[in-house]
Image (spheres, helix red, strand yellow):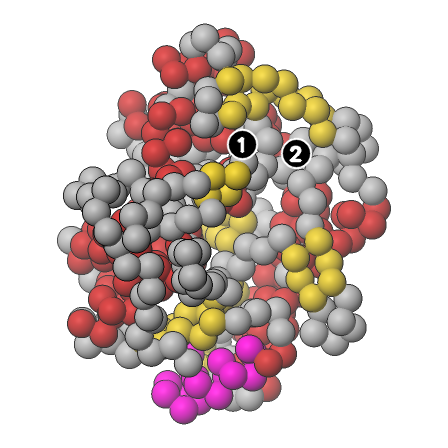
């Protein structure tokens, strides 16, 4: 079939297998062009099919020659419907890992469930014995609690007062003002339940109890802080409450794992184009301006560059990882440089529909959004027939 992008708001409902495979191969080639990392040997990535989770898996496998298990919730093609981008990404990664002689396995299912945790632990013990790195990179709008059965839904809302600021329709370039009503206490509770640290804690506890976590193991989860422009809807909103819970979990896990020489970190990463970030009002416009400023200064990084720097300089560098006053790794350090943020703020004040393409890299943002789904990738003939039915090697 000929596969073209079909969008619904911030979601692309189709994905291109060849484009996704090309994107993954480019990540692999980038890592292979960098110095090797004396890092982990057996790695579990929870939330492994897109974004920072996928990039973490690529770095572990191709910079450290690590064996990996990826856990993710993605769907295969069915009838006229393509598979999800994460499915195609994972199929391409598994093939590349197999070609390179790495042990690599995929578990497709609900990472929040006890069933998937049990299945994953069984695979670890059978194939690896234990893992020495656990990456927690789950992004989901909903979670069903494995003990109580309650289903929670997250929301992206401010706290206390209605929030208004500039936003952009990145498909049309129209700059408008978005106003978002404040969250209720129950919405805060549910967002923390989905995006906070409880499930990360459950994974580490289950791995430890089963003897599937190596002594001296490291675990890392990802968060974002961002600039004052986005604080009301992000860091000081419902998502911020959830991230505070995640960071508190990281501190507890660090103390828990230190008893056997292990470590737990929360890494604050740079703002990047992801399906999740595209859903947050204000953020796509901020990222578009940030991209322009950082590209002009030669400081721009994508997911793979960020994760390579995290692994090579912070997690497995020659000296212990430097953390901020709250115990977080700050791999967003280039984004948050005062001169970068000052220029972003200057441009932000001037942004309108008429000048958005001049004052921001909105076209780059839009292109990267479609590349998440395998589209707008050079070297791919999108008028040619493509086979949407792609199998994932080593799917368990």
- Secondary structure under badge 1? helix
Q: Quadrant of the C terminus?
A: bottom left
The residue that disc 2 covers is 233
Q: Image point 46% across, 20% down: which residue?
A: 173
Structural distance between the alpha carbons of marks 2 and 1: 9 Å
Above or below, comparing residue 64 to residue 346 in the picture? below
- 221 or 51, which is in the foreground? 51
Above or below, comparing residue 39 to residue 358 in the picture? below
Q: Which residue range is magenta in the image?
A: 116-132
How packed mark 1 is, by other alpha carbons closer than 10 Å (few <14, some 14-19, many 20 or more), is many
Residue 186 numbered mark, or none: none
Residue 230 in magenta stretch: no
Residue at the extreme bottom of the image, as rendered: 126
x, y percent for residue 328: 53, 51
Q: Mostly what secondary structure, the magenta segment?
A: helix
x, y percent for residue 270: 44, 41
- 358 or 18, which is in the foreground? 18
- Res. 91 visible in picture: no
The residue that disc 1 covers is 283
């Amino acid at each position: 079939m000929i596969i073209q992008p079909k969008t619904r708001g911030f979601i692309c409902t189709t994905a291109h297998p060849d484009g996704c495979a090309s994107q993954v191969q480019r990540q692999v080639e980038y890592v292979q062009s960098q110095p090797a990392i004396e890092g982990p040997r057996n790695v579990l990535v929870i939330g492994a099919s897109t974004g920072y989770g996928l990039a973490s898996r690529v770095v572990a496998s191709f910079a450290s020659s690590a064996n990996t298990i990826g856990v993710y919730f993605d769907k295969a093609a069915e009838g006229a419907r393509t598979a999800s981008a994460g499915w195609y990404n994972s199929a391409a990664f598994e093939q590349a890992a197999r070609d390179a002689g790495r042990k690599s396995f995929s578990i497709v299912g609900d990472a929040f469930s006890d069933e998937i945790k049990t299945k994953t632990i069984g695979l670890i013990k059978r194939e690896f014995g234990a893992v020495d790195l656990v990456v927690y990179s789950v992004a989901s709008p909903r979670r069903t609690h494995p003990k109580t059965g309650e289903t929670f839904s997250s929301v992206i809302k401010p706290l206390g007062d209605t929030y208004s600021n500039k936003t952009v329709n990145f498909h049309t370039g129209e700059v408008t003002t978005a106003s978002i009503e404040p969250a209720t206490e129950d919405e805060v509770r549910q967002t923390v339940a989905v995006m906070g640290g409880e499930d990360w804690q459950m994974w580490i506890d289950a791995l430890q109890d089963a003897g599937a976590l190596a002594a001296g193991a490291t675990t890392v989860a990802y968060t974002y802080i961002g600039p004052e422009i986005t604080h009301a809807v992000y860091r000081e909103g419902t998502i911020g409450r959830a991230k505070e819970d995640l960071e508190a979990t990281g501190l507890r896990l660090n103390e828990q794992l230190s008893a056997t020489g292990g470590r737990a970190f929360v890494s604050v990463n740079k703002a990047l184009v992801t399906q999740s970030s595209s859903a947050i009002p204000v953020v796509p416009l901020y990222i578009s301006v940030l991209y322009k400023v950082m590209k002009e200064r030669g400081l721009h990084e994508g997911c793979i560059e960020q994760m390579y720097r995290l692994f090579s300089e912070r997690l497995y560098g020659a000296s212990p990882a430097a953390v901020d006053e709250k115990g977080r790794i700050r791999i967003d350090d280039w984004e948050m440089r005062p001169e970068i943020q000052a220029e972003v703020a200057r441009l932000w004040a001037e942004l309108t529909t008429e000048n958005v393409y001049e004052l921001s890299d909105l076209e780059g943002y839009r292109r990267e959004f479609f590349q998440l789904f395998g589209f707008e990738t050079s070297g791919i003939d999108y008028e040619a027939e493509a086979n949407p039915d792609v199998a994932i090697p080593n799917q368990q």
